[in-house]
Image: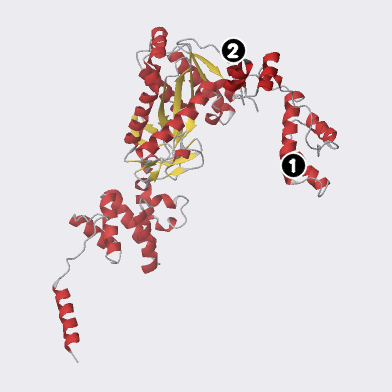
Amino acid sequence: MVTNQQVRILMKATKTEKTLSLAAAKAGMDEKTARKYRRSGRLPSEMKQPHTWRTRPDPFEEVWEEMRAKLKDNPGFEAKTLFEDLQRRFPGRFSDGQLRTLQRRVKRWRALEGPQQEVMFAQVHEPGALCQSDFTRMGSLGITIAGQSFDHMVYHFVLTYSNWETGTVCFSESFESLSEGLSSALFELGGVPRTHQSDRMSAAVSNLSERKDFTERYEGLLGHYDMEGRKSQAGKAHENGDIEQRHHRFKRAVEQSLLLRNSRDFASREDYEAFLCGLFDQLNAGRTERLAQELDVLRSLPATRYDRPKEVDVTVNSGSVIRVQNNVYSVSSRLIGETVRVRFHAETLEVFYGQRRVEVLPRLRGRKNHHINYRHVIDSLVRKPGAFENYRYREDLFPTSRFRMAYDALKHTMPARAHKEYLQILRLAAHETETGVDDALRALVDAEQPITTKSVKALVKSGQTPPPVTEVRIDPVDLGLYDGLLDGLELEEALP
C-alpha cells in the first residue's frame, strides 16, 4: 500500500530527477503507480472512497424500529438494557458478542437523532472578580493520625482567574466551618475578591428555621468582608466548575505526595496540616504571575476577622445534660435546672453561665450522638449505683479500654457488687488522676492481680509508674547451660 509520505517524496523527486522511473524508485514505488499519482495530483488518503457498505448482515435490522421508538420515548435507556430485553423476548437469537454492535448503533442514534445535550459555555475570568469555595471529603485517601483513622474534610478555596488555592481541615459542612475557612483563606490571600460563589450548602441546613438562620448569618459574613454572594443552581455542580475541578486535582496531588512520602500516617494533626500547607504552596508556585494581577485589584481586608458565633440558650435537664442540635452533652450537675448559653465554633461548643465560661465541649458531628463526661455525673452515680447498669449513656463512662476491662473482670469476680466497685474506681479517677488510675489498672491486669478499689488506690498513692507497654524485658541467658549440655553429649559418646 502506497502511503501519503511516499507520494510526497515522489512529487518532490519529479522536480529534480530526469525521468519518472528514477523519481518512482526514490519514492519506493513502480513507475505505473507513480504515473497514476502524478496524473491525479492527490494523496492516497484523498483518493480513498468512503466506506458506505456493510461487510456483514445487521442482526438488529428487524427490531431496530421498535428500539428506536423506545429510545425516542425514553432516551435514558442504555444499550445493554435493550439488549437484555431482546435476549429475554427472543431466546437464542442474539448472542452476547453482538452487544457491542447494538451499543455502536445506539451511540450513533444519540449523535444523529437523540435529544440535544447541555452546552457548557466557556467563561471569561477577570482578576480579583470571583472566588469559589466548597467542602471536599478526604476519607478515600486513608489518612491516619498516630495510627488512628482520621475522617475529615477540607474547606477548599480557589480564585477562578489565577487558580490560587488554599484550604483548612474541618469535620462538617457547618456555617462555622465555612466562616472560619473563608476568613483564614482571605487573610492568607491578603485581600478580598468582589464575589464569592458556593453551592447551595444544603448539607448545612436541615429545616426551614435553620435555613433562615443560615442565610442571615451567611449574609452577615459576606457583609463583613464586603463581598457579593452567588449560589449555583440545585443539581448544577458544573456552575461551581473551577472548585469542583480543583477538588479532583488537589486530591490527586495529595495522593501523589503521600506515595512519595511512603506513609499515610502522621504523628499529629498539626503535622498533617503542615503537610497540606506545604502542598498548597507547591501547587501555587506556578501561579504567581496571574496572582499578582489579582492582588493589584483585590479589595482591602477589614481590620478584624469575622467573629460572630451563633449562640443559643438551653436549660440543663435533670440528667445533667443539654440538648444542642439533636446531640446530647453533659455539664456539671450544679447547673441542673439553670439556663446556660451555648456558643458555636467549628470544632467546639462553649458553655456560659452568667457571663462566665464553665465548659468547652467537643462539637459532635451529625445528630443523635452524645458526649457524657463521667466527672459530671459520677458523684450522683456513686449515691445511686443501681442506675449504672441500665444508664442510657453507660458506654461513655468507660474513659479507656482498661476501665472496660476492669469492669468486666469485676463482674466475673464479684458479680453482686461489680457496679458499685467500678463506680468507686471511676470516682477515684475523677478526683485523683485518670492517667494514674489507668496505669494502676494496667499493672493489676498484667500481674493478674484482683482488681479492687483498695488495690487501685494503693497503686495510685504509691506514685509508681508501670513500664510502657512497648518495653519488653528479657532475662540474660546463662551460657554455662550450654557447657553442661555439651559435657553431657561428650559423656554419651564415650559410653560403649
**Which sits earlier in the primary sequence, circle 2 or circle 1?**
2
Instruction: Evaluate whether residue 95 shows in this view.
Output: yes
Q: Give the image location of residue 159, x and y in percent.
A: 45, 17
Residue at image coords 36%, 68%: 413
Quadrant containing the N terminus is top right
> What's the residue at 38%, 10% (across, down)?
300
Q: Quadrant of the C terminus?
A: bottom left
Instruction: For label 2, count other residues whose C-alpha is less than 10 Å away and answer few (under 14), some (14-19) or many (20+).
Output: few
Of residue 362 and residue 89, the one placed in the foreground of this image is 89
- Relative horizontal placement of residue 256, taking residue 19 as reference (left or right): left
- Kind of residue at disc 2: Lys
Label 2 sits on residue: 18
Residue type, numbered disc 1: Gln
The residue that mark 1 highlights is 98
Depth check: 474 or 319 in front?
474
**Residue 17 appears left or right of 145:** right
Instruction: Check disc 1: other Cα within 10 Å, few if <14, some if 14-19, many if 20+.
Output: few
Which secondary structure, mark 1?
Answer: helix
Residue 41, percent across and down? 67, 13
Residue 91, horizontal then vertical, whole percent: 82, 49
